[in-house]
């Protein structure tokens, strides 16, 4: 059970309802998931977090929406966040992620977590050329 | 300085040279980065790690190579691995990542790290519907 | 179920009972939570861990007890430790944490986890002035 | 060197300058630290991140500013983020953190990281009473 | 329920069955644990992961098998991975880990997680002598 | 430079000197590494941390000292703690860790970090049999 419980639409303040309404309209679904209902206990954080998610994940940009969902899963898996893995895996599937795409995503995430530790454990120094490439392209 | 030092091509055993040669041929560059030269102290791990990286990152699949590099950066940043951030940022740039793409990548990674903690800190339970979606699409 | 099971007071050795008694007396409650009952399988670690917790969290210092509980939650949420989030959220509430305080705590924890990754992902170098301030105030 | 370099005030676009100006006015200092100069390559993320930091860390709330800085350090240390440890330790000192306060902060952060792993490693189940407390106080 | 469900032997493709058969033969047991059945949705990753596990954990080396299991638990606990803690604790017990060994393992893991943060939080610079020792022994 | 600087023996209080003396006597070396000199700004934490390290890492137990050092490295690498990787790699080498042992250690640590994410990402449920084994051996 969430720390402060979940706030349903009918029990929500006008401020919270406005966010719920925008989520529904933006996502074209009546469903509000538990994350937002838990966050609704702090309307300031609810509003700011939804506004940020909308700006980052919904507004058109140079990365397509499905790629962003895959990145979200990659982070959530690395952090071992059960809720976000479940919610963003569901979102990615609705957005077109197939099982083979999920399989490759997991392969990359697993490998990156492995080589992160090999690089750090072997105390490998950053190649000067990586810094050069950075400078020249900035 | 790397824990066991770096092994240059001219000092490498035939087993290690074979891996270096394959890296060069696969990547179309003479440059072998420090990660592999450090790992070369353990030829078994060098061989297995390169074979895995090649299978995951180089072999054609359903995710394009640049998306995989972005995912690699997302994991490396979440784990705070300086070496891998530098090397995969360089690789992503060679693969076509522009500064606006990097900006959006960082925005998603930052946001996911934030909401991972909000979801966990509020102890939000996974919506049953997320499990349903999983079952139905598997 | 805990790895080695839980040891209840009536089944405990004198060494373990002494720690349980001190927990009860210090916390003014008969309740011993599962963490200690699980740890009781290793009396040396039980004793040392309780002594450390008592010294750090119970002994008067320059930080007040509630601030220390908030810090404990901040770390536990960042590490995604479900048990410690639950136990220290309960402890903080008994110590006076209100829902608005919890809300602000989560906002700070979420934001810090986000900017930690932005700073690392952008490979930002530490401002020399931060080192100066450190030196001058030490 | 930061991935995309640092953008100084004189080279900044009007959009970026507006954020820099607000940072200066809010913090009562001419100094803009590297984090913002690195982020300035993505004006959208710069603006959103500063607005969030201002709302969370600067606006008056129920937690005092110094407590928030201590929490920020707790998260940054747990994540091993060198830049944020340096910048927020400097900020906390300007805000009144003494060496004894820093010492106690580190003691709590270290201990929490230890018991997080003991609780998880022993696979301790959450005490039902912790859930009761949550429900009753929500 | 696993993201893509679990694939039982009777429903498995010949490619997957070959891996299952090798797991059974190598481990001298009919039991295939859920991890492999979940991974079986991606036969390439299943095959590569099992081959790596077999090379690292099963092939004779300079570290004995039980020490490797203890190391696996140490990493899994640090990462807060519930599944791997459960599976490798079971494996370590089958391999001879006693409760006192588990207790000492947890004590080391907890302490290392604590001092990792103290070292980073105090921003301690690496002693030059540690680099010398590395160089001389490489 | 460490947050509060380093305290050398000649500048240390009697309380700190007592700890330094015990470190020297216990380790049979005049050398005090930077970690302790940084921690010396908080004599209470210095004393407690050294006492814990001595109890866990130095007192004879069922795990041998070198195995404990390998576990310490495994945790430090997983947490990406540069200082502790350097100091405990040096300690392990003095304690008999050879390059092949280091290579196998890194292979296990890398692999565990990979499969931790595969297990979590695939949302694999813990096999009931793992819980049975736990119960029966407790």
Image (tube, coloured by chain):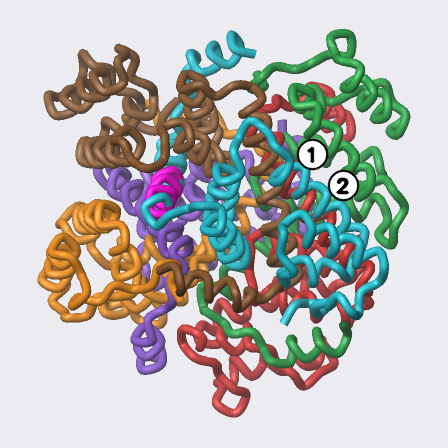
Chain colours: A red, B green, C orange, D purple, E cyan, F brown
Q: Do the dots labelled 1 and 2 sit on one chain? A: no
The answer to whether residue C30 of the structure is visible from this angle is: yes
The residue positioned 70% from the left and 23% from the top of the image is B43
Q: Which residues are magenta?
A: E102-112
- Check the image and name the residue furthest to the bottom: A10
Relative depth, front residue between B6 and E52: E52
Are the residues flagged by discs 1 and 2 in contact, CB closer than 8 Å? yes
Residue bearing the label numbered 2: B99
Alpha carbons under labels 1 and 2: distance apart: 8 Å
The x and y percentages for residue B110 are: 60, 51
Give neighbour class at mark 2: few <14, some 14-19, many 20+ (Cα, 10 Å): some
Subunit of label 2: B
Residue A41 occupies quadrant: bottom left
The x and y percentages for residue B58 are: 85, 39
Tell me: B134 left or right of E61. right
Relative depth, front residue between F18 and A24: F18
């Amino acid at each position: 059970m969430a720390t402060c419980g979940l706030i349903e639409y009918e029990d929500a303040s006008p401020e919270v309802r406005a966010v719920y309404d925008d989520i529904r309209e933006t996502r074209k679904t009546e469903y509000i998931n538990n994350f937002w209902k838990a966050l609704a206990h702090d309307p300031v954080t609810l509003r700011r977090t939804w506004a940020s998610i909308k700006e980052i994940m919904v507004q058109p940009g140079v990365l397509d929406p499905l790629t962003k969902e895959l990145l979200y899963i990659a982070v959530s898996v690395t952090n071992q966040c059960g809720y976000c893995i479940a919610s963003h895996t569901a979102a990615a599937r609705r957005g077109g992620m197939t099982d083979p795409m999920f399989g490759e995503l997991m392969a990359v995430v697993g490998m990156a977590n492995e080589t992160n530790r090999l690089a750090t454990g072997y105390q490998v120094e950053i190649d000067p050329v990586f810094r050069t490439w950075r400078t020249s392209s900035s």
